[in-house]
Image: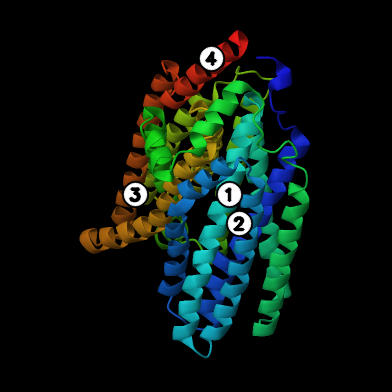
Amino acid sequence: MSNSLQRPMFGWFQIIRLGLIQACLGAVVVVTTSTLNRIMVVELALPALLPGFLVAWHYAVQMVRPRMGFGADKGQRSTPWMMGGMGILGVGGVMAAWATVWMATQPLYGALLAVLAFSLIGLGVSACGTSLLALMAKRVPEARRAPAATTVWLMMIVGFAVTAGVVGKLIDPYSPQVLLQVSAGLSLLTACTTALCLWGLEKDGGTPLNPTETVGTERLQKQSFKEAFQEVWSDPAARTFTVFVFMSMLAYSAQDLILEPFAGAVHGFTPGQTTQLSGWHHMGVLIGMLAVAAAGSRWVAGRLGSVQAWMVGGCLFSALASVGLVQSAMTALWPLQANVVFLGVANGAFSIAAIATMMRLAGEGGPGREGTRMGLWGAAQAAAFGLGGLLGTAASDLAHALLGEQSTAYAAVFGLQALMFAVAAAVALRLRAKSTHSQPAPAEQAVHFQGQEWLKGGSSS
């Protein structure tokens, strides 16, 4: 097939625009999951279980991601879903702030409104985030996927940090009116920025560029979501990668809520020192992300190992670092800070490698299924993050109740985390073996065959 029939791939300008959209998404989410969390617990003296439930609920709502991705596939454009998702997310963010203010006088009604608000937040994140990843899978060249994934995720992290800092200053001293004004301003700013970034991004639309794609599009348009989902789930590589995403992200998220309490309870760190420790972990994650981006760049061209090798290795080294945390729970002489940095590097390496692999696998199921496949893996990640915090804290409480002694209890939890990372590495190895001997997916074979028949018919007429 000639290059003239290929839809143009994204360059760095387009990738940065997608990164800005991801940063906008993160900006709204970080206010609802951290700032409002603190206001509910501190200023309003509400039970910490309430914001914990709301955050878990917004992850639960993200089980609709496959359906959102299917909608983008069906419409053959990601732009309406990203813009619509950002709009819904913005409305949910303002509604969440309003619900928080209402809780001060009517806790029950405020909490009910908050459930609705966090439902909208989950829907908005699902629509925008899934469509963004699907568009990257379609339009980012393979050689640029790891650096592109790193760029987009770093921009999201910057969005987290900048928004948290700016909003924190704007609402200090806290007042309900200021909170509502800042929330509304943020939602309006992110919606306008997203619209600007999306302007002309898919200017060629979803118009099929060749006969084979035309036949494939017509077949996919007739499918229901159930049929499309069953087709994706029937792919062994898609199922295996779903298990990998769930296990690796479950282990990754399980450590978030127990690392700082562990450092304080076992090693005697002050609150400031535990915050710094968390910062060291994030620095390690950044180093790991940049390392994978460098390994996947065209200048290195695989000499530092393949993306798949970084994914497997990242999980194995994460397991090893978790074993180090087990050791640190047993002896005070263990270099905890260095261990946490090592854990962060390993975490960052496997997570970016997994995103690059996700983009590759999304396109291997044939054209027109990228959104559905991305939605499946996004739902697995959301389920893992929703369960991870709960599992980490619950396992810690259970270990304390059964074992009684803090060091042994935390060692047991970190040991469980190491086991999950090891299982994820084993699953990634299976995925690598399958992809080495993979055959075209049934849908792709059908599209290719029908396209050949169409061309034969056209040439004989």
Residue 273 position within the rendered picture, expressed as x and y whole percent measured from the top left: 55, 60
Disc 3 or disc 1, which is closer to the eye?
1
Q: Secondary structure at mark 3?
A: helix
Q: Amino acid at mark 2?
A: Gly
Residue 2 shown left or right of residue 348 in the figure: right
Disc 1 target residue: 129
Image quadrant for the N terminus? top right
Q: Amino acid at mark 3?
A: Met
Q: Secondary structure at mark 4?
A: helix
Disc 2 or disc 4, which is closer to the eye?
4
Q: Amino acid at mark 4?
A: Gln
Q: Amino acid at mark 1?
A: Gly
Disc 4 target residue: 452
Q: Are marks 3 and 1 in contact (CB under 8 Å)?
A: no
Q: Secondary structure at mark 1?
A: helix
Say if residue 165 shows up in the picture: yes
Distance, label 2 to label 4, CA atoms, is: 38 Å
* Crowding near the residue tagged with mark 4, few <14, some 14–19, many ≥20 C-alpha atoms within 10 Å: some
**N-term-proximal mark, 3 vs 4:** 3
Q: In the image, which disc is placed on residue 330?
A: 3
Image quadrant for the C terminus? top right
- Residue appearing at x 46%, y 78% in the figure: 112
